[in-house]
Amino acid sequence: MSHWKKMDKEELEKQYSPSCWSHRMGRSAVIESHIKELTKGTLKGRKEAHTKLDEAYGQEDCEKLDIYLPPNPTTAPALLIYFHGGYWQMLSKELSGFMVPPLVRAGVIVVAVDYVLAPKGNMDLIVSQVRHSVAYIVQQYSAVSVYICGHSAGAHLGAMVLCTDWAEYSVTPDIKGALLVSGIYNLCPIVYTSVNDALQMTEDDAVRNSPMEFVNTMNGLDRNSEIVVAVAQYDSNEFRKQSQEYYQAIKAAGFNASFQDISNSDHFDIIEKLVEENYILTQVLLKMVSRK
């Protein structure tokens, strides 16, 4: 029996409510602060880069992306694709350009992706859209090395991209690395929390969309691709456990994986700080994209 099935509903709910765990401020304050920081960082990113905003990668209104181009592009640029968090039902690409400043300075192209939010879209559709977004980006920028980054629900989506069978998308992305931050890799516990009110997942839906289920089928990904799984000191025990178990599984499957446990950070500022050049995870990203 899975350990989380032994928890009562109240405890499970708390474990999957990241705003309960911040050491810096209360629940509503930490979410408010998070949106403020992401907004501020994205405005900074839009000032520092050449932007192509609201580019369509599909037919639906939500199938749009923002492209941030370095003012001084290199001949063989790296390209980072970012998937935002928000429990698949909040946030947007408009709040996803905060990591742009240090990356474009290093000559990296950054792409922030929008996808349908629940309850308008279900998990199968969300995962399909982010996979299509990667296929579209790769077709536009065929000669680049691709890196994936995602936070929370976006880390789940990034991990689903890593286990994609690209044959049905008629592309083979050259994914060289991924930074997955405070993610969820087994969706089954989510089915029994209020997060699922909007998603309406069954257990079968959750299993079908859980990266932990597909670690041994990540055949489209080069074993040398660098995968960094990061988690915050003040993430909940369940979030920390999910990150550790996913890291151990991909390491055991033979991937070039490493684990970053970020001290004195919570579920929110662990990603917000990517706006800072000297922040540990910014340095991890910069090192990753420079390792050809």
Image (cartoon, grey):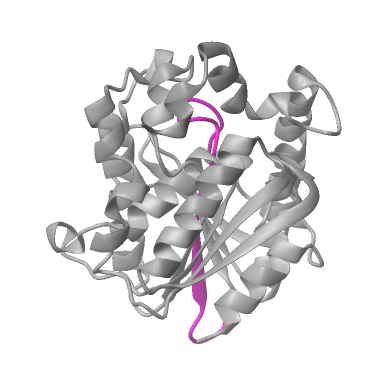
> Residue at coordinates 29% horizontally, 48% vertically from top-left?
213
> In the depicted view, which residue is nearer to us: 180 or 203?
203
Percent from the top left, x then y, of residue 174? 35, 75
> In the depicted view, which residue is nearer to us: 143 or 282?
282
> In the depicted view, which residue is nearer to us: 210 or 44?
210
> Residue at coordinates 74% horizontally, 55% vertically from top-left?
262
Q: Please give left or right for residue 270 compared with residue 290 in the image.
A: right
Residues shaded magenta: 71-92
Q: Total label count?
A: 0
Quadrant of res 170: bottom left
Percent from the top left, x then y, of residue 39? 71, 38
Please say whether residue 90 is one of the residues in the magenta stretch.
Answer: yes
**One can see residue 71 in this view:** no
Question: Magenta-highlighted stretch: main secondary structure?
Answer: loop
Percent from the top left, x then y, of residue 207? 28, 36
Quarter holding the N terminus is top left
Q: Please give left or right for residue 202 compared with residue 290 in the image.
A: left
